Amino acid sequence: MDIPREGDRKYLDIDPKTIQQYRPKGAPVGLFIIPNWITEQEEQDIVNFLSVGEWSSHLSQNRPTKHFGYRYEIRGYSSSTEKVSSDWGVLRKHADRIEQQFPGVSIAQCLANLYYKHTTIGAHRDRETPMVFGLSVVGDINMVWTEMANDKNRYEAFIPKRSLYIMSSDIALLWKHEIPARKTIKYPDANGDLTVTVKKPEDYIRVSITYRHFANTILPEQQVQFVNRVMNDNSNVPLEMKVDNAYQQFIKENQGYLPPLLNSAVQETRNNLVVKKEKGIEACHLQTVIPKHRENFQRLFTEHPWQKWKSRFGADLSRSVCGESNIVSKCSGIYAEWVKLFCQRILGVRIELGGAFANYYPDGKATLPAHRDQYEQWVFGLSFGETRTFEFVPNDVKANIKRDTGIISIVMNSGDVVLFSPKVNDDYKHRILAEPKRTGPRINITYFISVLPGEDERKMYNPPDIQQHLIPTFEEAEAVYLQNQNNKQKGITKMPPKEILSQDGLIIQSEDGQVYVVVDGTLIPFDSMEDAVAAYSQAM
């Protein structure tokens, strides 16, 4: 194949929709090899750049390396957090070219490996890396892949110098790859089969430039693109439909190469844009609905008499707790009234409060061990302060397992609510794991509530599109709280729903036999039904 001239870049105009043409004969899904991706001059520029400075034996004594962006660790990306050289030199332009040709890809790390005649690398899979781009320079090589579920299923490919090979989807996630110890290189014949064997010269040398794309690092960039696409949609359709349309566009544009983990990252971003039911369980995550959540944080902290409890093993809990939160804290009591107003006005369900419990997390090291509630009541949890990740863990998954496809993770920001039914405890535990990078304090107030008879419980975990201007304010809740306190001083222990208080002259009787007459929205108690009727008649 003729090598294009330096000024001729047509061979680089790769269309992801037609990338399947670069899939080698018989290759597993997700493997692509693009020959002559760089020119001879670009190859020489890479050699010149890497010839300056020392190589590292950080990963192997027999395979020198150079690290760019983040130092690569064999344990995977979660361990590769040490920033190293920010000067990628000529390597950066090739990373930019990859990002340009494959929308949605973000290159955060680059690793250069130096191979000699007898250098090998054992079978491995790049952990937490759903997409790898390898630029092979100076020397040709054979690479071998082995399916992890069946080690007898192997595939071998020829990777020529100046080519770009891509591992995505199945080949990246389900197969291990290696460069075995060989004195020869197998070249393809006219049919593409590796039948032509040539010995490696004694001075054989090859440089592998590995660019890694991580789902963990793509999410912020992908999120910005995704949100902008939704917000710039001027069509007259509901937000949910705009989100679905944007998501489908992303899938359509990237379906030729986008790996499953990135699809999951986009899906998570999609879900965070709208109020949603959590994956088929009776729970939902309501975002930024709590009024004055930042302004009242210090007040909530000051009003609660926090206590340090011990675990069942006798150790102090990493968080502080406070029972009867709505009673000991006026601010929490006001939020209790807000919960009632919110359920009735926004969710369309009347509820009764059963109690409240508060947790204080001083920093990200404080945790909530996996457990199930035994209260047989709905949980309405309000989050104030630092962002933390709340998780539902299937009961058949061990409590200390950090990753499992059945675990449902919810990122709780300040002002968010998590709401779930008592039935959730039949199948899930819930927890908050340590997040050392979260340094701020957090307060969670859990209100235990019961749905009144005749109400549709399904509305609790299938909320409507929430319009911010309809959400009850803190001042509204405070007015109800103060009215209740005033009524308690008058001997009225329980307030009926607001629609009853609007019916002047109505005579009602509570469960304990107390008789009241509604006058100007206030309950006036009477000793007997006769006295109430007489008073009502005189008033009329």
Image (spheres, rainbow, N blue to C red):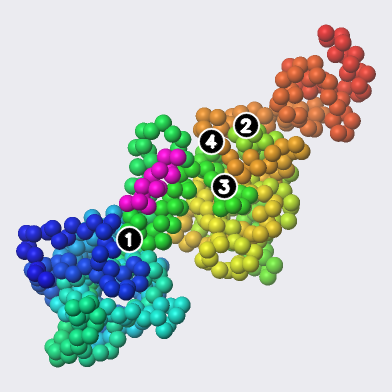
Q: Could you tell whether 118 is left or right of 332 in the image? A: left
Q: Quadrant of the C terminus?
A: top right
Q: Earlier in the sequence, mark 4 or mark 3?
A: 3
Residue assigned mark 4 = 466
Viewer-nearest of labels 4 and 1? 1
Q: Residue at x 33, y 79 (%)?
A: 155
| Residue 257 image label | 1
In 3D space, how far apart are the residues under numbered discs 1 and 2 (Cα atoms)?
A: 46 Å
In this view, the residue in front, 248 or 26, is: 26
Residue 264: tell me if it is visible: yes
Residue assigned mark 2 = 345
In 3D space, how far apart are the residues under numbered discs 2 and 3 (Cα atoms)?
A: 19 Å
Above or below, 291 against 445 in this view is: above
The percent position of residue 303, horizontal first and vertical second, equals 63, 43
Secondary structure of the residue carrying numbered label 2: helix
Q: Could you tell whether 139 is left or right of 17 in the image? A: left
Above or below, 279 against 397 in this view is: above
Viewer-nearest of labels 1 and 2? 1
Residue extent of the magenta highlight: 241-253
Q: Earlier in the sequence, mark 2 or mark 4?
A: 2
The percent position of residue 531, horizontal first and vertical second, equals 91, 18
Q: Main secondary structure of the magenta part?
A: helix
Q: Amino acid at mark 3?
A: Lys
Label 3 crowding class (10 Å Cα cut-off): few <14, some 14-19, many 20+?
some
Residue assigned mark 3 = 277
Spot the residue most to the front.
191
Q: Residue at x 61, y 69 (%)?
A: 398
In 3D space, how far apart are the residues under numbered discs 1 and 3 (Cα atoms)?
A: 30 Å
